[in-house]
Amino acid sequence: MVGWLVDFIFVPSLWQGTQPSAFTFNDRKNAASVSNLTYSLMEPNKGHIRFLDQIRGIAILAVFVYHAFGAAWGCSEIPWNHWFRSMEAVKNLNIFLPLVFGWTGVAVFFVVSGFCVHMSYLKSSPDDLRGFFIRRFFRIYPPYLLALFVFTFLWPSTRLTFHSFFDWIQVGSHVGLIHNLNKNTFFQINPSFWSIAVEAQLYLIYPLLLLIVRRIGWQRATVGLCVLEITMRGTAGIYETATAKQISTWFMYSPLCYWFSWGIGAIVADAYFHRRKLPFLSVKPFFWLLLGVGTYFVKPFVTFTFFFFALFTAALISKLLRDDRKIPYQNVLFDHLRIVGMCSYSMYLLHQPLLISLLIFLQDHKVNMHFQPVVLVLIFFSTYPIVLAVSWIYFRYCETPSIALGKKLLNKTRGFGPVDKGVGDVPPVVKTGGWLRGFLVG
């Protein structure tokens, strides 16, 4: 990481035009016209970036199998034996051990989100923060709010009884997207919702990031964010190792602890849009992946696993932007990952309560007592087609209309101008009536 920081800071080609030229239209136009800075084989202004759907698809599949494995095994993490993971405790499930890294799919989502958010901003009207917040709101909040309503009031395995006032606090904290800041609300209703709150808070401080970049440039801003996240994660690792207690939730799951991991997506987007040399290419993505895997097994460093998987994702996106024409998009696997990626947000919102419901059913009927853990894992994996189908329907009839409504409102408030084009953040969808064919065959 030290080598990358030195490269990042002292290689001028990474930071040509480090002042945020995105703030004026003329600067954007000038940057786009400098052909000798072109590093990517793709065209930033052509709209949807194809491989982002596949990356999202891989990320949500990783999260799904992680939660399925945890539901079947009863634990999603390898237990600790002092400073190291106890491999003896999971010797009967060695074949499934890679699944314990499935939670790092959230790191992938954060980087992709940072990339798409900044690309969307760069392609919109200069300093259009109102438009930015309208797009973000309708992109995530209405689908989230509907899912929250269903799981709070209707879904049997997650609904609240409201026998205590604290249940109303649960609802209020989730509606306000601040439930990630308290351990008593963090994993309630739907455990997956914690990252939605962090993401929303990152959206709120995104204008602050733009202001910082305007004042000191991308280079210093990025180093500052990196130091901030390393400091917070290092503090958490030292504290939890020394005390055998978890650090306060408000500290570990503050958006500040994820600002760099999210912001590096914006760094890649800014370089890509302005035809500068793409960052993170001086070190192979595999190096960051190796560090991410290694830190997972050592207690003082486990808090950096997310950090390194985020760097891995940023380096991979840069590499794919450079090598896009080499990617074999036309095959069955890529088609399926595209479909999964398109409805990944809906799948993220819905999948865990569905798995919890299956777990409760198996426990109530004592089915889990008659099978080995390996068989239980396969049972939970078999729910994937159902979860995907439900997620696609939710995407088609909730998420997509919400995005369209946001665009409609945005264009009304502007009073002119075309509908914003997607950059990978809002995937193109099949026409009404053709959703089933799109789901089946891509």
Image: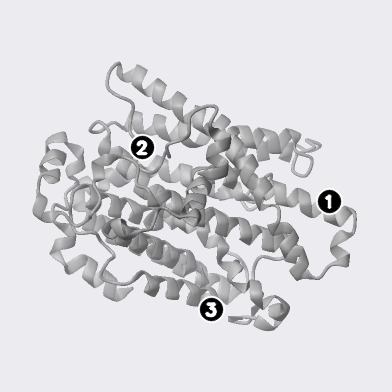
Which residue position holds label 2? Answer: 422
Q: Nearer the viewer, residue 58 or 216?
A: 58
**Identity of the amino acid at label 2?**
Gly
Question: Residue drawn 27% across and 22% down?
Answer: 417
Q: Earlier in the sequence, mark 1 or mark 3?
A: 3
**Residue 73 rendering spot, x and y as whole percentages:** 74, 66
The span from disc 2 to disc 3 (Cα, nearest Å) is: 41 Å
Based on the displayed image, in which of its 4 quarters is residue 367 positioned? bottom right
**Residue 326 rendering spot, x and y as whole percentages:** 31, 60
- Placement of 343 over or under 82, stated as above or below: above
The span from disc 1 to disc 3 (Cα, nearest Å) is: 36 Å
Does residue 115 appear in the picture of this structure?
A: yes
Which mark is drawn over residue 361? 1
**In the figure, is residue 398 to the left or right of 26?**
right
Does residue 176 appear in the picture of this structure?
A: no
- Placement of 361 over or under 153, stated as above or below: below
Q: Earlier in the sequence, mark 1 or mark 2?
A: 1
- Placement of 68 over or under 438, stated as above or below: below
Asked whether disc 2 touches disc 3, contact meaning CB atoms under 8 Å apart, the reply is: no
Asked whether disc 1 touches disc 2, contact meaning CB atoms under 8 Å apart, the reply is: no
**In the figure, is residue 124 to the left or right of 374?**
left
- Tag 2 secondary structure: loop
**Other-residue count near label 3 (Cα within 10 Å), few / some / many at <14 / 14–19 / ≥20:** some
**Identity of the amino acid at label 1?**
Phe
The span from disc 1 to disc 2 (Cα, nearest Å) is: 41 Å
- Tag 3 secondary structure: loop
Which residue position holds label 3? Answer: 298
**Identity of the amino acid at label 3?**
Val
- Tag 1 secondary structure: helix
Q: Earlier in the sequence, mark 2 or mark 3?
A: 3
